[in-house]
Amino acid sequence: MNENKINILDILLIIVKGKIFIIIFTLLMSVIAVVYTLVVPERWSSQFTVFPIIDSNAMSLNIGLLEGLGMGSQTTARAINQKNATVLKSRTITEETIQKFNLIEYFNITEEDSLKAMEDAIKAFHSDLFYVLLNDEVFFMTVRITTKDKYFSQEIAQHYLDFLINYSHDNKNSIGRQRRELLEHRILEITEEMQFLAESLQHFQNEHNIVEITEQAKAAITTYGNVIQNMLEIEIELNYVQNQMPNSPMHRDLISRRNISLEAIRNLESGYDNLPFLLSMENINDKIFSVQEMIFRLELYQRILQTVYPQLELARIEEINNMDRFEIIDLPNLPGRRSFPKRAVICVMTFMISLVFSSSCVVVNSIVSDEDKSKINEIIKLIFKWKK
């Protein structure tokens, strides 16, 4: 029974006897591996790593509120990383990247149909070029871009980092952002209305020669009252003279003075052409009302703005607090060494595998009997025989 056993020395003896085949096969495969690493296109990887920043107090409060709904995990760093990874893998950003960097030509896609070409480019992009690694232990997210050019890899990686930053700051639809946009829209409307009222007020004042409506109204009323009073005094004196000395010089003088006063009253009521800043009495109330109404509306809008602006600042603060913030651990790097092919690794692995495989073939060939070899050959012939 011991004669049928094969020990280590027997195996070594078999390997030594077949050393020529082993050496030739191993050298041949090693040469093929070297040629492969020299011929295959080089690939370079650029990557960046980010770490989400979570407010521990806010996170613990949110988890406590949402645990009953099964939503507490949404506030964790893992959920933020998964969401960001999903966004970066989305079709929208993928198509935008393919179009921006002309990756259809990079992948040598010759499909004439633009939709089919885009589908092929997206498939090639996610299988050969783009890779996202999520570390659930330390909550790092690493994005790696691998292309045939080191600068091209860094450029695409930087594009993805910029997109992630902009998405975090500008695209997250939070309650704070909705309030901020609503308040900004309202402030814009109020500002435009105030500008329109200010221009209307200025146009009205220029058209009607208004400088200070209150003072001008007081001056017009005082002047009108003085003329009326003077007119009444002339009428009293004229009635007396007309009864005592009709057609006398004094009577004619009083009539002339009365006519002048009447003309002055008519001018005050309708307006003086040579005194444009003296308001006419016939529409002084309308002018005062119009000016006061516009001034009141301007003051009202100013008070509304004084109330809305603090709310806008609070909404901005709330939006910042609700924003997904992250720390950039590594910026997109310019690779110093290629990621593929690893010439030394490939050559060493090929050498070791070839050595083991050739040695195994020699040992198996020595162990198998001639009868078994003939059976194996017969099996091979039957497998590859096309006709019976």
Image: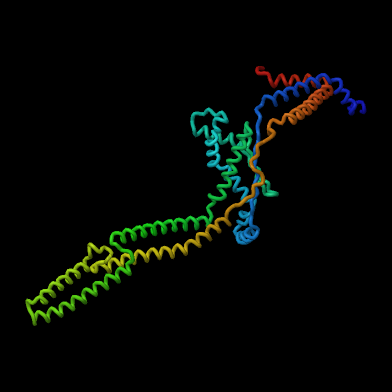
Q: Measuring 57% from the left and 35% from the top, which residue is drawn there? A: 123
Near-viewer residue (276 or 300): 276
Residue 346 seen anywhere in this rendered image of the structure: yes
Q: Measuring 53% from the left and 36% from the top, which residue is drawn there? A: 100
In which image quadrant can residue 301 be found? bottom left
Quarter of the figure that contains the N terminus? top right
Q: Horizontally, is 278 left or right of 193 in the view?
A: left
Find residue 95 and report its horizontal and vertical position in percent.
53, 38
Near-viewer residue (277 or 23): 277
Quarter of the figure that contains the C terminus? top right
Q: Measuring 57% from the left and 30% from the top, which residue is drawn there? A: 106
| The residue positioned farthest toward the front in the image shown | 249
In which image quadrant can residue 40 be found? top right
Q: Horizontally, is 163 left or right of 353 in the view?
A: left
Q: Image height check: is 324 above or below 216?
A: above
In which image quadrant can residue 319 be found? bottom right
Find residue 209 and report its horizontal and vertical position in percent.
29, 62
Find residue 71 and report its horizontal and vertical position in percent.
60, 56
Residue 120 seen anywhere in this rendered image of the structure: no
Near-viewer residue (190 or 374): 190
